Amino acid sequence: LGLLIFTLPLAICSEKWGYRNTVILGLFCREATRILLLFGEGVKVLMIAEVAYAAATVSETVFFAYVFLVVNENLFTLATISVYTSYHLGNIFGAVIGQIIFESSNNMNLLFYVSWTFVSLALCMFLFSSQDQKRNPQGNMMNTLLYSGWNSMVNEVSQFYTDKQTRLWSLWWIVGYSGFTIWVNHFQSLFYEMSPKTSFGYLEVLLEVFFAFGCMVPLLSSPYVMKKIFHNRYLREGNLEILNSSELVADISEYSSSYIPLRYENAGRLIAITSILFGGLCFMLITQNHMALAFSLIGLMAATFSMQSTYATAALAVQQNHARYSLLFGLNNTMALALAFFLQKCVAILQGQQYIYFVIVGLLNLILGVMLLVYALVGLKQ
């Protein structure tokens, strides 16, 4: 609920205050969360920490949008892959460190001190990073609301979705991210039901590995990379030459800017088929009682969603002529979180069992996948 409340307001504020300043605010909220948990006492302090954490988490969306302000447009896809993969690699590193500390000392305070140290380092690095931007958002939703009124703001929002490509990718984002939110909120409970005594720390690490791999799929899955980078240039008569890192980066950049299919008519079928796959895996998951097989399904689903979100983020950024990335991402996230909240609330009111959540996610993705596949096969040819 906290994410739902903060997502759109923070996206709107980012256009008023600037993306960079909003990210800094989010990092200070992370600082506040650690300080309150370490030194605060009482329910009210915990409630404030929850609010600060929600604001900090939402600011990640602004950070992902900020990336598109500081890189050239032909590197949008490569930047998305790099940032998303780095995000999950950071989670892997943090989870391993946390699990080691917990197993060796069982000291939660030490965990929070270590976490606070990393957050402080991130804040310092971002404060002293380059402030050069390639472009600036051409619009300010807060000013529109304050000086032109509600109707003008609604009209401005509708302009985001006049482009067919934006509508299609946003459809996946809203429905797909909504299903993923429900999924990520409940799969751990499913694990605990299967095996209450299992230590899940390292399973979380493995899950983040799946997420990181999914982010790299758009780069690694193409024959272009294997053929051009590792065969045409670097393999000579079966001998591996010494890799020139600058040439390797140049080749990957060229691949990123010219080869990765970002328009829906190219990548749409892949997104549609993988949505159907994700839905089918949900139904397989609720029939499993074996922990290893269930986790394998969870890992495959994590990689699938990660790959889809990487494509969608880069594709939506490419379609944005006015560089209002944060607001578009915020709008889509808000609708997705609202849908997820509504569906979860319905299940809770009806006192549905745990597996019902996965049935809902499965149906959402199956319907979404069929709709997108039909459109990819038929709609874009008309």
Image (cartoon, grey):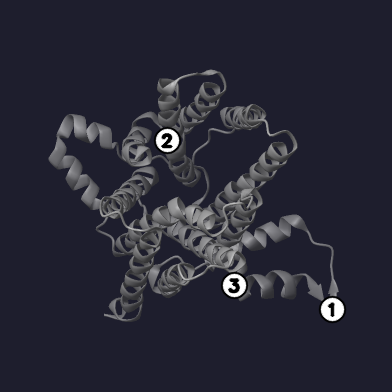
Q: Which residue shows up at 22% across the image and 45% down it?
A: 156
Image side of residue 70 versus residue 173, left or right = right
Q: Is residue 35 above or below residue 266?
A: above
Q: Which residue shows up at 64% across the image and 56% down it?
A: 206
| Residue placed most toward the observer, 171 or 200 | 200
Where disc 3 sits, the SS reads: loop
Mark 3 crowd level (few <14, some 14–19, many ≥20, 10 Å Cα) = few
Q: Which residue shows up at 20% across the image and 34% down it?
A: 145
What is the CA distance from the residue labelled 3 to the residue labelled 2?
37 Å
- Report if the CB atoms under discs 3 and 2 are less than 8 Å apart: no
| Residue placed most toward the observer, 125 or 107 | 107
Q: Earlier in the sequence, mark 1 or mark 3?
A: 3
The three-letter code of the residue at mark 1 reads Gly
Q: Is residue 129 above or below residue 300?
A: above
The three-letter code of the residue at mark 2 reads Ala
Residue 374, visible in the rendered structure: yes
Between label 3 and label 2, give the one nearer the viewer: 2
Q: Earlier in the sequence, mark 3 or mark 2?
A: 2
Where disc 1 sits, the SS reads: loop
Q: Is residue 163 above or below residue 335?
A: below
Q: Which residue is mark 2?
A: 54
Q: Which residue is mark 1?
A: 238
